[in-house]
Image: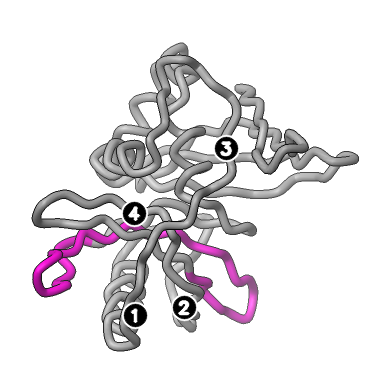
C-alpha cells in the first residue's frame, strides 16, 4: 500500500513536510471512463475483496458489489494512471463503503493492479485519505508507521459520534495478523476545506 500512498500524494499535490492539517477543496479534473471499463474495474475490485481477509471488519461470505464511481483525483505519467474507485459492499448485516486504487495502462486501459485502501461506514476522498495517512503524526509511533507501510495493510473507518460540527472517527490500520487504532476528528474550515486532528489512543 505504501506505493499507492506516494502516488496519490503526487496526484493531489500535497506537501506533507509542512505538517499541514488542512485539506483544500478538490479541483475536478477531466476523467471519463467507459461503461465497459467500469464493469471491468468493478469485477476486479470485487474479486480482490472476495480473496482478501478483512476480518473482523468484513467477514468472508457473499456480498453484492455496488459501483458508485471514480474519483476526480488521479495520477498519471507517460504510460500509467492510478485511478480511485468508490463502491459499497452490500450484505444483510452491513454495507460498508470501500475505496480502491487501480493501476491502469494509458494506452489500452488494461488494469495491472488493484489495491483496497479503506473500508468503513463512510466514504472518504483520496485527497483527505492520503493527507491523513501521510501526516508526520505517524513518525512518532513506530507501530502505526510499520502497519501503515505494510504491503497488505488496509484501513477501517468507523464514525463514533458527531459533536456540533465535528465528526469523530476511529481509523484502524489492520492486516491478517494485527491492528492499531487512532482517532480522527474532522471539522469544516468554513471555506470549502476540511480541518482535522489526529489522536492516538
Compared to residue 140, the image places residue 194 above or below, namely below
Whether tag 2 and tag 1 are in contact, CB under 8 A, the answer is: yes
Along the line of sight, the residue nearer the viewer: 39 or 148: 39
Compared to residue 86, the image places residue 79 above or below, namely above
Q: Earlier in the sequence, mark 3 or mark 4?
A: 3
Along the line of sight, the residue nearer the viewer: 5 or 24: 24
* Residue hosting label 3: 24
Callout 1: helix, strand or loop?
Answer: helix
Q: Nearer the viewer, mark 3 or mark 1?
A: 3
Q: Which mark is residue 67?
A: 2
- Decide: few, some or many residues near mark 3? Use Cα within 10 Å; few <14, some 14-19, many ≥20: some
Cα distance in 3D space between marks 3 and 4: 16 Å
- Decide: few, some or many residues near mark 1? Use Cα within 10 Å; few <14, some 14-19, many ≥20: some
Q: Which mark is residue 106?
A: none
Q: Earlier in the sequence, mark 2 or mark 1?
A: 1
* Residue hosting label 4: 74
From the top left corner, tell me how far across and down residue 77 is, in percent.
16, 49
Cα distance in 3D space between marks 2 and 4: 18 Å
Q: Which mark is residue 38?
A: 1
Q: Earlier in the sequence, mark 2 or mark 4?
A: 2
- Decide: few, some or many residues near mark 4? Use Cα within 10 Å; few <14, some 14-19, many ≥20: many
**Which residue is painted at 29% across and 36% down in the image?**
6
Callout 4: helix, strand or loop?
Answer: loop
Callout 2: helix, strand or loop?
Answer: strand
Q: Earlier in the sequence, mark 1 or mark 4?
A: 1
Cα distance in 3D space between marks 2 and 1: 8 Å
**Which residue is painted at 51% across and 33% down in the image?**
132
Residue range (magenta): 87-113
Q: Nearer the viewer, mark 1 or mark 4?
A: 4
Amino acid at each position: 500500500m505504501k506505493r499507492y500512498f506516494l502516488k496519490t500524494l503526487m496526484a493531489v499535490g500535497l506537501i506533507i513536510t509542512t505538517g499541514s492539517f488542512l485539506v483544500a477543496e478538490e479541483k475536478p479534473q477531466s476523467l471519463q471512463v467507459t461503461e465497459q471499463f467500469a464493469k471491468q474495474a468493478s469485477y476486479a475490485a470485487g474479486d480482490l475483496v472476495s480473496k482478501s481477509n478483512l476480518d473482523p471488519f468484513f467477514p468472508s461470505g457473499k456480498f453484492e458489489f455496488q459501483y458508485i464511481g471514480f474519483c476526480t483525483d488521479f495520477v498519471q505519467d507517460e504510460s500509467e494512471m492510478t485511478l480511485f474507485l468508490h463502491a459499497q459492499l452490500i450484505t444483510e448485516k452491513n454495507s460498508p463503503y470501500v475505496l480502491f486504487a487501480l493501476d491502469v495502462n494509458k494506452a489500452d486501459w488494461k488494469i495491472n493492479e488493484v489495491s483496497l485502501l479503506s473500508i468503513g461506514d463512510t466514504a472518504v476522498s483520496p485527497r483527505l485519505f492520503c493527507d491523513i495517512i501521510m501526516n508526520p503524526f505517524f513518525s512518532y509511533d513506530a507501530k502505526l508507521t510499520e502497519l501503515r507501510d505494510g504491503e497488505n495493510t488496509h484501513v477501517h473507518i468507523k464514525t463514533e459520534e458527531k459533536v456540533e460540527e465535528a465528526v469523530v472517527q476511529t481509523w484502524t490500520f489492520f492486516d491478517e495478523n494485527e491492528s492499531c487504532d487512532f482517532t480522527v476528528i474532522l471539522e469544516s474550515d468554513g471555506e470549502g476545506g476540511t480541518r482535522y486532528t489526529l489522536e492516538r489512543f
